Image (cartoon, rainbow, N blue to C red):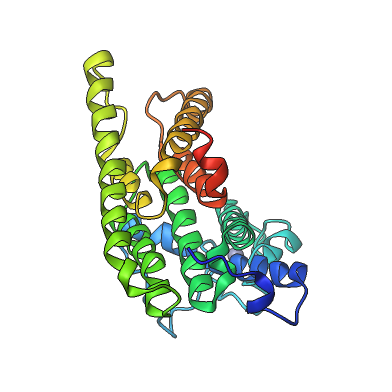
Amino acid sequence: MPSVPISSAWPILPFWLVTSGVFVLGLFLGSFVSALSWRMPRGYSILSIDGSKRSVCPHCRTALGVRDLVPLFSYLFSGGKCRHCHKKISRRYPLIELMTAVFCTVLFVFTPLAQASIPGFLIMMMLALTLSAILAIDLEHKIIPNRLNIAVGVLGAAALLLPYITAAASLETLGKTLGTAALTAAVYGILPIVIRYVFFLVTKKDALGFGDIKFFAAAGLWLSLSALPLFLIISGLGGILLGLVWKKATGEDAFPFGPALIIAFTICLCLPEKILSAFL
Ligand SMILES: [Zn+2]
């Protein structure tokens, strides 16, 4: 990934101001994620923009105005209640908005790609949106939709090719880059299948869902092989922790592994190569 300083992309505004802007952008992307993560697992169309069907309060059906549609703040100022019928609004909305904003901000601050160019920035914001949607859907439905794993993979491929499209990298290295990426994605994709198989032999239980395995492969298009040990350590520990909390909170043994994978992936994506390879 190209490592161009922020100053070259945003020469005028101070970094904290740009970062605050990214956070606010993330809140608005978060309202989209809260709608997407509600619709996608239920099989509804995601991008149906129907003028006659404005957002309404699920209780009193009052059409929501601009004052009700400011992410997070509408919820906070209304005390989590509808302004018209005063019934409670689900906490998932502000939580998903906040989570998406955090993903956007973290990826903006810590990945060189997000700061290097506008296309790089857009790729990272779409990745933040996708990660937030996967986390929300997996927590609520214990599935990772194929389309979201594909989105992670396609964005990874776009990030790899971007330097060649913008001529920041010489085409001579393209073959090597693609070969390395394909090999890395294969290793990331095969390893969880092995883990699943061994875990099943030992415990007779399924450790990883197929959605999780596909996420591994998509993550392999983003991460290097040297990030693999840390990725496994963090997702493994995160999974154990999540499993314990899940059992305590719901009494169920089966828990969604996606959130642990997403956190591990985000951390590995944000750490410089030097630190990642120290875990090898
Ligand atoms: Zn209402």
The residue most toward the top is: 202
Quadrant of picture, ligand 1: bottom right
User: What residue is at 69 percent from the left and 74 percent from the top?
Assistant: 7
For the question of whether residue 19 can be seen, the reply is yes
User: What residue is at 41 percent from the left and 66 percent from the top?
Assistant: 159
Against 207, residue 225 (above or below) is below
Residue sitting nearer the eye, 71 or 169:
169
Image position, residue 128 (x, y; %): 51, 60
Image position, residue 49 (x, y; %): 40, 80
Against 93, residue 209 (above or below) is above
Image position, residue 212 (x, y; %): 33, 41
Against 87, residue 254 (above or below) is above
For the question of whether residue 84 can be seen, the reply is no
- With 38 as the anchor, is 11 left or right in this view? right
The residue most toward the bottom is: 51
Residue sitting nearer the eye, 11 or 156:
11
Q: How many numbered callouts?
A: 0
- With 10 as the anchor, is 118 left or right in this view? left
User: What residue is at 31 percent from the left and 33 percent from the top?
Assistant: 208
Image position, residue 33 (x, y; %): 48, 62
Residue sitting nearer the eye, 253 or 176:
176
Residue 80 location, quadrant: bottom right
Residue sitting nearer the eye, 214 or 146:
214
Against 145, residue 210 (above or below) is above
